[in-house]
Amino acid sequence: MSAVRAGAARVDVVLAALAEPVRRRLLEHLGDDERAAGELVAAAHDEFGISQPATSQHLRVLREAGVVAVRADGPRRLYRVEPRTLSVVEDWLAAFLDPFAQPLDALETELARGRREMRRRDPSAGQVPEQSAS
């Protein structure tokens, strides 16, 4: 499989995992923090009325897609977001963003720098001449 197809397949796996509202909400609960599976089960039950086994299935899908990582801490399982996996989707989405936005921002900065330089050399260069009332 080519690198492009492998990358596209990876994006498909991640987007499929995130297509389900319960899984997206679980990801939001994780944010940039680690959370115990029990906390995530309680949150899913409160918000969606789903059981522990159903939540476990959602967490398994996220884990298999690489969206979350899990580690054992005694009897608890702690979940966290895997940002490297999410960056695959970010990179894919970047292809659809305005390709001119950054170059235009840079041009605006250069124009402002040029105006400042002109004013520094000739303070009257940026002033509008007064009009006389006839």
Image (tube, helix red, strand yellow):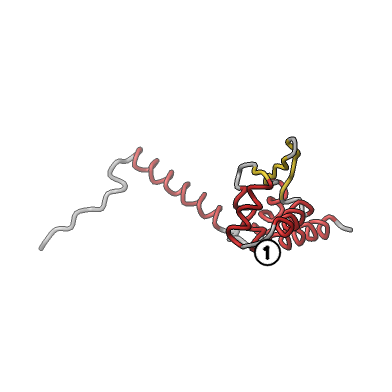
Report helix, strand or loop for mark 1: loop
Task: Judge the density around disc 1: few (<14), some (14-19), many (≥20) Cα neighbours within 10 Å.
Answer: few
Where is 116 relative to 13, above or below?
above
Quadrant placement of the C terminus = bottom left
- Tell me the quarter of the picture where residue 89 sits: bottom right
Residue sticking out furthest to the left? 134
**Residue plotted at (74% across, 57% down):** 53
**Label 1: which residue?**
20
Residue sticking out furthest to the top? 74
**37 and 67: which is toward the camera:** 37
**86 and 99: which is toward the camera:** 86
- Tell me where residue 119 appears, x and y as whole percent: 34, 42
Quadrant placement of the N terminus = bottom right
**14 and 98: which is toward the camera:** 14
Q: Is residue 101 left or right of residue 114?
A: right
**Residue plotted at (26% across, 53% down):** 128
Count of marks overlaid on the render: 1
- Tell me where residue 77 appears, x and y as whole percent: 73, 42
Kind of residue at disc 1:
Glu
- Tell me where residue 8 appears, x and y as whole percent: 78, 60
- Tell me where residue 52 appears, x and y as whole percent: 70, 55
**Residue plotted at (68% across, 54% down):** 91
